Image (cartoon, grey):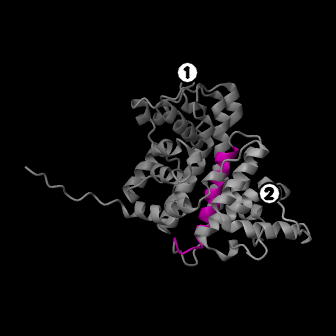
């Protein structure tokens, strides 16, 4: 007897739009390889040489740029390695990042002059959010690469508005995106401060990025479902709504929630490692506890705890006598986290 298979339920239109208009363009930019910056300068030079081998069309304009910076007097062929060292691995990396991103976006305001190798602005200015995120955590921070990548996603959304991918016309969400970025930096640092008081936090270096991905998910939804979603999130910003309830409200309205969108976004960069799985449980990480995925559970919970303290007015009264979150924070009840005087000083509970 043959079994007839019925048609699969179509994915919500919003997910299709997310994949085609936002995740697709970000993933199409071949930048993953240089989001991680080796500590050793020789390894950085080697990585950049590999990038030029993968994208040889950038060699000639880069050589012309270096020649112009040297006064245009260089007649002897200088090895590419020495040109990178002259320009610095940092600036070469930024120069390549902008050009690789603009291969997808094709924006005039980012377009390099191939005759001179010059960008329309300094790469540091163009990659504004990537640099601000990294600077907020410090060059010596173990978080520097993941927050740089998260900041770069804010830059990508900033410029993506100006492309046909989103078809927004003259509408821009620059101010709202900027506010979301500032919140992400502040909340990420707050979460990072909390991590010192959590026992055995295996994936601790990913915790600040949960705040970035949460805000990026909100911006993405606003750009895909404007203007109704903008009003939706503005109302939530002044409420005391918990993350589980926000997820339920999003599901009711859009058939997706913040964690699902953030999970798709996180999949674009391998540097984010376990973050796609972590964010897929955003709003209800207790499911991870049931599935014995405590490393995933703990990062999601720490992210949610930091945001609850930052946005929801959570204070010491919401913690039980043991110092653990009590039933007023049910999504955090399994979190092995003690509220000490140092914690209160750290987060101003």
**Lateral position of residue 6 relative to residue 125, left or right:** left
**Point 72% across, 49% down: residue:** 46
- Quarter of the image where one finds residue 157: bottom right
Q: Is residue 130 visible?
A: yes
Picture coordinates of residue 98, whole percent (x, y): 69, 64
First reached walking from the N terminus: tag 1 or tag 2: 2
Mark 1 vs mark 2, CA separation in Å: 56 Å
Q: Main secondary structure of the magenta part?
A: helix
Work out whether residue 147 or residue 301 is closer to the camera in this orientation and state it.
Answer: 147
The numbered dot on residue 322 is 1
Picture coordinates of residue 71, whole percent (x, y): 92, 70
Q: Residue furthest top?
A: 322
Picture coordinates of residue 11, whole percent (x, y): 34, 59
Label 1 Cα crowd, 10 Å radius (few <14 / some 14-19 / many 20+): few
Work out whether residue 189 or residue 67 is closer to the camera in this orientation and state it.
Answer: 67
Residue 45 within the segment the image draws in magenta: no
In the image, the segment drawn in magenta is 144-165
Work out whether residue 43 or residue 211 is closer to the camera in this orientation and state it.
Answer: 43
**Lateral position of residue 261 relative to residue 290, left or right:** right
The numbered dot on residue 84 is 2
Q: In what element is the residue under mark 1? A: loop
**Point 37% across, 56% down: residue:** 255
Label 2 Cα crowd, 10 Å radius (few <14 / some 14-19 / many 20+): many
The quadrant of the image that shows the C terminus is: top right
Position of residue 44 relative to residue 55, above or below, is above
Q: Is residue 176 visible?
A: no
Q: In what element is the residue under mark 2? A: helix
Position of residue 323 relative to residue 299, above or below, is above
**Lateral position of residue 177 relative to residue 229, left or right:** right
- Quarter of the image where one finds residue 206: top right
């Amino acid at each position: 007897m043959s079994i007839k298979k019925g048609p699969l339920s179509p994915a919500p239109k919003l997910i299709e739009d997310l994949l085609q208009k936002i995740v697709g363009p970000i993933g199409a930019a071949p930048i993953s390889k240089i989001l991680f910056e080796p500590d050793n300068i020789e390894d950085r030079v080697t990585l950049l040489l590999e990038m030029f081998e993968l994208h040889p069309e950038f060699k000639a304009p880069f050589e012309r740029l270096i020649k112009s910076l040297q006064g245009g007097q260089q007649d002897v062929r200088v090895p590419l390695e020495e040109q990178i060292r002259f320009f610095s691995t940092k600036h070469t990396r930024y120069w390549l990042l902008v050009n690789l991103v603009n291969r997808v976006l094709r924006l005039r305001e980012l377009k390099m002059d191939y005759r001179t190798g010059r960008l329309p602005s300094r790469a540091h200015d163009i990659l504004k959010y990537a640099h601000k995120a990294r600077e907020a955590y410090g060059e010596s921070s173990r978080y520097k690469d993941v927050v740089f990548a998260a900041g770069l996603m804010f830059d990508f959304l900033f410029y993506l508005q100006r492309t046909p991918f989103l078809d927004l016309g003259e509408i821009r969400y620059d101010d709202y995106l900027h506010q979301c970025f500032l919140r992400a930096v502040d909340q990420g640092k707050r979460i990072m401060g909390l991590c010192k008081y959590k026992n055995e936090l295996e994936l601790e270096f990913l915790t600040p990025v949960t705040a970035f991905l949460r805000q990026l998910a909100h911006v993405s939804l606003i750009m895909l479902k404007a203007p109704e979603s903008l009003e939706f999130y503005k109302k939530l910003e002044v409420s005391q709504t918990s993350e589980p309830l926000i997820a339920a409200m999003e599901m009711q309205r859009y058939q997706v929630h913040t964690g699902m969108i953030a999970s798709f976004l996180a999949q674009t960069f391998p540097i984010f490692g376990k973050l796609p799985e972590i964010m897929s449980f955003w709003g209800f990480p207790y499911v991870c506890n049931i599935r014995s995925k405590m490393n995933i559970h703990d990062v999601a919970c720490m992210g949610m705890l930091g945001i609850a303290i930052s946005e929801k007015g959570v204070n010491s009264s919401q913690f039980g006598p043991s110092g653990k979150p009590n039933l007023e924070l049910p999504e955090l009840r399994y979190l092995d986290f003690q509220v000490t005087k140092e914690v209160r000083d750290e987060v101003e509970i």
